[in-house]
């Protein structure tokens, strides 16, 4: 199959994007959130299933270990798939592996990869400015953490922002039926391990994956160190980097968005990047975009200068 293309910088359609009327009106009146309707029913049912399931089955260290064990591949598909590949095109791969990344990412129930990438690219263009779709500064903590993914105002996928992805019919189909991979995973989990595996390996694990991911939009713009004086509030947070396999080096990422690695120095652990390097050894991915020395050393602020 043909190689999936990559981009060396933010797509031109995003670079020229400004605050559209829909976003401006929504931020003026307050975002509408689908807390309880058909579109968000699955979100709350999985939360309920995790809490009720653990209460009914009882606490289990084996179940807790299973949830965290299955959390690792889920989080990898979020960080390497949704984020570094589909949103930032930080490396290249084949069309077949691109599909695997899409299936793995959508198995974490964060909507379609086209939808996710379209919204994330606007976040970077307008980070913490009017028009940012999930900003603590602009819209508050809970909106940035999870309200945005439940919002009526943000349900649509603007394909003008993701022309590089929209040309693939398989990605378009998955974007429309984004819940299918998660349903397959839930069914497979139950088939293999019954209710115990469904509760711990799917529901609890899914809740952990959601809120682990969401911390980067919320907590990573509130707590941590700022090595680079970016125009937003992004921060480097080692604890969140561990929780999210490297995404917590958020100030680094906002300083240089296209890099496949977010831990710029050897002591900044970035498990997603290590796994991508391992895949590159086998030719599964290639052309991982690095961090030029002059970019890494361009400190406008020291690590300790701006901290919370």
Image (cartoon, grey):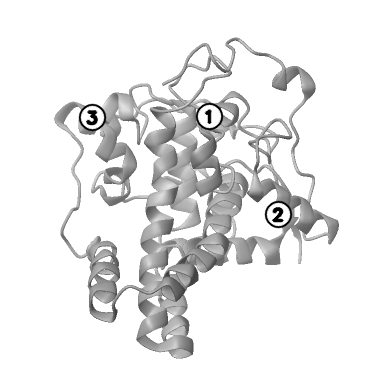
Q: Secondary structure at mark 1?
A: loop
Q: Is residue 251 left or right of residue 143?
A: right
Compared with residue 218, is residue 151 higher up or lower down, i.e. above or below? below
Asked if one can make out residue 302 in the rendered structure from this viewpoint, the answer is yes
Marks 1 and 2 sit apart, C-alpha to C-alpha, by 21 Å
Please rate how many residues cluster around mark 2, counting C-alpha atoms within 10 Å: few if below 14, some from 14 to 19, many from 20.
Answer: some
Looking at the rendered structure, the secondary structure element under dot 2 is helix
Distance from the alpha carbon under mark 3 to that under mark 2: 38 Å
Residue ID for mark 2 = 275
Q: Which mark is residue 187?
A: none
Residue 142 locus on image (x, y percent) = 26, 39
Numbered disc in front, either 3 or 2: 2
Residue 228 at what x, y percent from top left? 57, 17
Name above or below for residue 70 compared with residue 132. below
Q: Give the residue displayed 84% in from the left and 61% down from the top.
A: 282
Badge number at residue 236 = 1
> What numbered label is drawn on residue 27?
3
Q: Give the mark, 3 or 2, whose residue is nearer the N terminus.
A: 3
Instruction: Give the residue displayed 75% in from the left and 35% down from the top.
Output: 290
How many dots with numbers?
3
């Amino acid at each position: 199959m043909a190689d999936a293309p990559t981009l060396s910088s933010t797509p031109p359609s995003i670079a020229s994007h400004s605050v559209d009327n829909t976003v401006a009106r929504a931020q003026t009146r307050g975002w509408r959130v689908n807390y309880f309707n058909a579109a968000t029913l699955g979100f709350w049912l999985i939360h309920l299933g995790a809490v009720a399931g653990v209460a009914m089955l009882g606490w289990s260290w084996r179940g807790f270990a299973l949830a965290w064990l299955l959390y690792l591949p889920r989080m990898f598909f979020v960080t390497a798939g949704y984020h570094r590949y589909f949103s930032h095109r930080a490396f290249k791969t084949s069309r077949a592996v691109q599909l695997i990344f899409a299936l793995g990412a959508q198995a974490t129930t964060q909507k379609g990869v086209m939808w996710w990438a379209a919204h994330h690219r606007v976040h970077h263009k307008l980070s913490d400015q009017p028009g940012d779709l999930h900003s603590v500064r602009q819209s508050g903590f809970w909106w940035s953490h999870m309200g945005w993914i439940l919002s009526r105002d943000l349900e649509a996928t603007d394909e003008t922002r993701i022309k590089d992805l929209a040309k693939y019919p398989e990605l378009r189909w998955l974007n429309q039926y984004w819940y299918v991979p998660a349903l397959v995973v839930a069914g497979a989990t139950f088939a293999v391990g019954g209710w115990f595996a469904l509760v711990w390996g799917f529901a609890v694990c899914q809740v952990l994956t959601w809120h682990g991911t969401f911390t980067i939009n919320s907590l990573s713009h509130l707590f941590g160190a700022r090595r680079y004086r970016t125009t937003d509030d992004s921060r480097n947070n080692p604890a969140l980097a561990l929780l999210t396999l490297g995404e917590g080096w958020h100030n680094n990422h906002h300083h240089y968005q296209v890099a496949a690695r977010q831990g710029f120095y050897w002591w900044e652990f970035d498990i997603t990047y290590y796994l991508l390097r391992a895949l590159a050894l086998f030719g599964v991915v290639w052309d991982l975009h690095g961090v030029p020395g002059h970019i890494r050393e361009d400190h406008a602020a020291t690590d300790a200068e701006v901290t919370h």
